[in-house]
Image: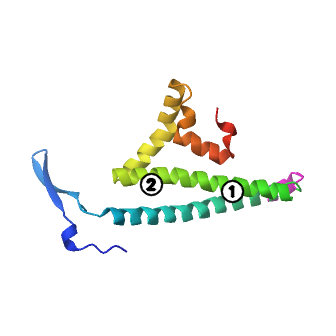
Amino acid sequence: MFNYPVEKISIRFYKYKFLGYEKPVIVEAYNKIQAREALKLFIGKFFAMSIFAVIFVSFTFIMCVGTSLVLSKYQHFDTHLWTSNIGLKHAMQLLLNSFIALIGYGSFGMALGMIMKSPMAAISTSLLWFLILEGLVGSMVKGISKWMPGNAFAVINEGGMHGLP
């Protein structure tokens, strides 16, 4: 997709000593990617992540609804409200909210990945933030949790502003 001339790519070797052995280590394999090419890469990753999110949420939604409809017949549970116009409207609204929230979480992680240039560091940092640090900061500083990104994505997933203080 991107063809970089050889002059733009530089490989730097650094030596480190560990237990008396010297080993060359490749530290930087790409150095001069222009900003517009990085933006193209970011937009391409965003669309790929969005398509994956749509497929993933749709598959999960279809499996959950299908399983619920099949199992409700065995439990003699009335499901005519689920398939009414109002029920389908709420189901589609839930599906859209899940799409938006998952794309928000993915965009946050993708932006961290672009900043850190390491997928594992971005995944670790985002999980640490969303699962631990955001809760700690929210419990220590009163009123700040409504401004945190994880809380905002959770409120979007739940359907709107009712979760905010």
Nearer to the camera, 158 or 72 = 158
Amino acid type at mark 2: Met
Q: Is residue 77 magenta?
A: yes
Q: Nearer the viewer, residue 21 or 52?
A: 52
Q: Is residue 103 left or right of residue 111?
A: right
Q: Which mark is residue 84?
A: none
Determine the CA span between mark 1 and mark 2: 22 Å
Q: Name the residue that disc number 1 marks.
A: 95
Does the rendering let one see residue 15?
yes
- Crowd band around label 2 with a 10 angstrom C-alpha radius: few (<14), some (14–19), many (20+): many
Residue 128 part of the magenta-drawn span: no
Q: Is residue 51 above or below residue 132?
A: below
Residue extent of the magenta highlight: 70-79
What is the crowding at mark 1: few (fewer than 14 residues within 10 Å), some, or many (at least 20)? some
Q: Residue at x 49, y 30 (%)?
A: 137
From the image, which quarter does the C terminus lie in?
top right
Q: Are marks 1 and 2 in contact (CB under 8 Å)?
A: no
Above or below, comparing residue 32 to residue 100 in the picture? below
Q: Quadrant of the N terminus?
A: bottom left
Instruction: Where is residue 72? Give x, y as percent.
Output: 84, 54
**Residue 110, numbered circle:** 2
Is residue 142 toward the left or the right of residue 9 in the image? right
Residue at the image point whose x is 66% and y is 58% from the top? 60
Does label 1 or label 2 sit earlier along the sequence?
1
Q: Element under label 1?
A: helix
Q: Position of residue 112 (x, y in %)?
A: 41, 50
- Which residue lies at the image location 11% right of the left edge and 50% below the top edge? 21
- Say whether residue 119 is visible: no
Which amino acid type is marked by label 1?
Leu
Residue with the most extreme front position: 36
Q: Measuring 11% from the left and 52% from the top, which residue is drawn there? A: 22
Q: Where is residue 108 drawn, in percent x and y?
A: 48, 50
